[in-house]
Image: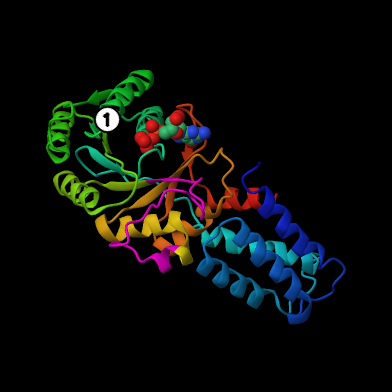
Amino acid sequence: AEMFGQLTSGLESAWNKLKGEEVLTKENIAEPMRDIRRALLEADVSLPVVRRFVQSVGDQAVGVGLIRGVKPDQQLVKIVRDELVKLMGGEVSELVFAKSGPTVILLAGLQGVGKTTICAKLANYLKKQGKSCMLVAGDVYRPAAIDQLVILGEQVGVSVYTEGTDVKPSEIARKGLEEAKKKNIDVVIVDTAGRLQIDKAMMDELKDVKRVLNPTEVLLVVDAMTGQEAGVFYVNLELCDESIIKEIGKPIALVTTFNLEIGITGAILTKLDGDSRGGAALSVKEISGKPIKLVGRGERMEDLEPFYPDRMAGRILG
Ligand code: GDP
């Protein structure tokens, strides 16, 4: 299924109900606004986001008539479009680079979200921009993750710093950074261990690694397929209350928790090529306060691009 397919048709049915109306009123938009609300919720958009969104769109719509030949139903499309762009952060959030010395990008995320793949994709992406990159293998709990990083590094022509699994991640990070400085590398991308759920040990380890690296970017890799009904229980209750998770949705609870615990600079959304309903793309910024900077949409090394709120809104509106 197309990611926003259902959302697109749900929104369309809202405008269709307003065809032929000369002005939008509280009364005639009531039913279309319910359609919009339903479509967003079915796309897994976070509940508080949906509430605020619908309120704001409704407020702007009431009283709108024909403007410069554009009919009221089309005006509503424009209001929703602008509001969607705003919701996703407005502008593209570019990666930030250090003014001097290597730029350090620390990647975090749960197991299986596509973090190792993103390390190599990101190196490939930055290499194409003329930057020299080095990968640091900090996932010491899964030897297979280190092997995979080495293989992917070779594939994109980027060196991978490894210390095996017997050295502490913060120590690997320190040594890797030293090595990168020696080699005059522009960007160091540090992979960290993912677990099946957030726990205190994971957070403490990440904090250690972050302290050692003083990274320019701390990016949380989030799987777009993490829906509200995801089977794995993703967030440890010590760190985030269950009722809050229910209310805001798991992907966003994840971003928020990581942000509160270690302080992140943004998120990378992966697996946008899958049959995710897309809600995470719409809610992450508003709830967590942190932008989605990049999106992965496939298993090939080329499948990484900046997150463009306006293009995403365009896709949603079909
Ligand atoms: P990690 O455990 O977070 O390091 O995850 P991996 O990088 O090992 O990826 C887990 C699985 O997801 C692998 O089979 C990847 O090929 C796959 N994967 C990663 N990114 C994407 C993506 O953007 N789209 C799709 N369809 N699959 C992906």
> Which of the colour schemes (rainbow, by chain, secondary structure, one colour) is used?
rainbow
Identify residue type, mark 1: Leu
Q: Is residue 31 magenta?
A: no
Vertical arrangement, residue 222 with respect to residue 132, above or below: below
Tell me if residue 115 can be seen. Answer: no
**64 and 52: which one is in front?**
52
Give the quarter of the image for residue 261. Answer: bottom left
Quick check: 293 left or right of 32? left
**Residue 295 position in % (x across, y down):** 47, 42
Find ligand 1 in the image and state its quadrant: top left
Which residue in the structure is indicated by mark 1?
A: 135
**Residue 282 position in % (x across, y down):** 53, 56
Quick check: 113 left or right of 261? right
Residue name at image x 33 percent, y 20 percent: 151
> Which range is magenta?
221-245
Q: Is residue 243 magenta?
A: yes
Residue name at image x 53 percent, y 41 percent: 272
Quick check: 294 left or right of 237? right
Residue name at image x 35 percent, y 33 percent: 116
Using a 10 Å C-alpha cutoff, classify the residue at mark 1 as few (fewer than 14 neighbours), some (14 to 19) or many (20 or more): many
**31 and 181: which one is in front?**
31
